[in-house]
Image: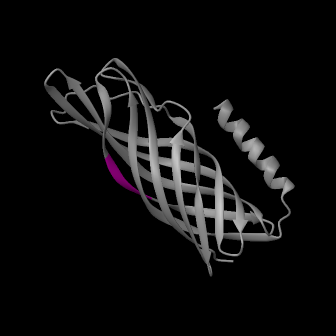
Amino acid sequence: MKKICLVIIAILGISASLQAQDFSIGPKLGISQGNIKVNGDGYESGSDKFGYHVGAFVRMGGNSLYLQPEVLYVNTGGEIKETQGMEEKTYEASFNRLDVPVMLGFKLGDVFRIQGGPVASFLLNSEFEDELNGATVPDYKSSTIGYQAGIGVDIANMIIDLKYEGSLSKQAESIAGLETDQRQNQLILSLGLRLF
């Protein structure tokens, strides 16, 4: 939690230093392709899971540099495969989160952008299932810190973003009592509409 507070304070400091020559606000929605990166004996990442997000964004800044904080409800997840000899099990995880990414971006002309920054994720609820429904549910952390980086295009009042999200902290540390390092990764495509 201390890390999250420090990140938010740093972002607020950056935003205060930007001159608010441009200010936009509006809704944002999109789709994502997520997976769970797993490190642990006998475990590996399984299939990706398609998800969605919906929320709002604010953009403020100058002609070339801008800050874009967002608040998003996110549905994502992925699969984890366990191999024991010839036997293979598949676990499916699904997460509903509140994500707060804060993008620092650079405009390349009037249309193209590059951006990156931290994202704080707060777990609202999760589901964890295996084929036999007998697995012990991992103890998922209530909040994690990650990063997002990507490109964007501005067309009229639309903003289109393509970003990659990676995790800087573990989402869970074990499956069925066996030590693992689980981290959520996503490829995100979103559309925002500037209301003004």
- Specify the segment rendered in magenta: 48-52
Q: Residue furthest bottom?
A: 156
Position of 9 with respect to 93 (left or right) is right
Above or below, 6 against 161 in this view is: above
Position of 67 with respect to 26 (left or right) is right
Splitting the image into 4 quarters, where does residue 60 fall?
bottom right
Splitting the image into 4 quarters, where does residue 139 fall?
top left
Splitting the image into 4 quarters, where does residue 89 fall?
top left
Please tell me whether residue 166 belongs to the stretch shown in magenta: no
Residue 169: x percent and y percent?
54, 32
> Which residue is found at the position 34% from the left and 43% from the top?
78
> Which residue is found at the position 28% from the left and 23% from the top?
42
> Which residue is found at the position 39% from the left and 39% from the top?
36
Residue 55: x percent and y percent?
54, 61
Residue 110: x percent and y percent?
70, 75
Position of 183 with respect to 58 (left or right) is left
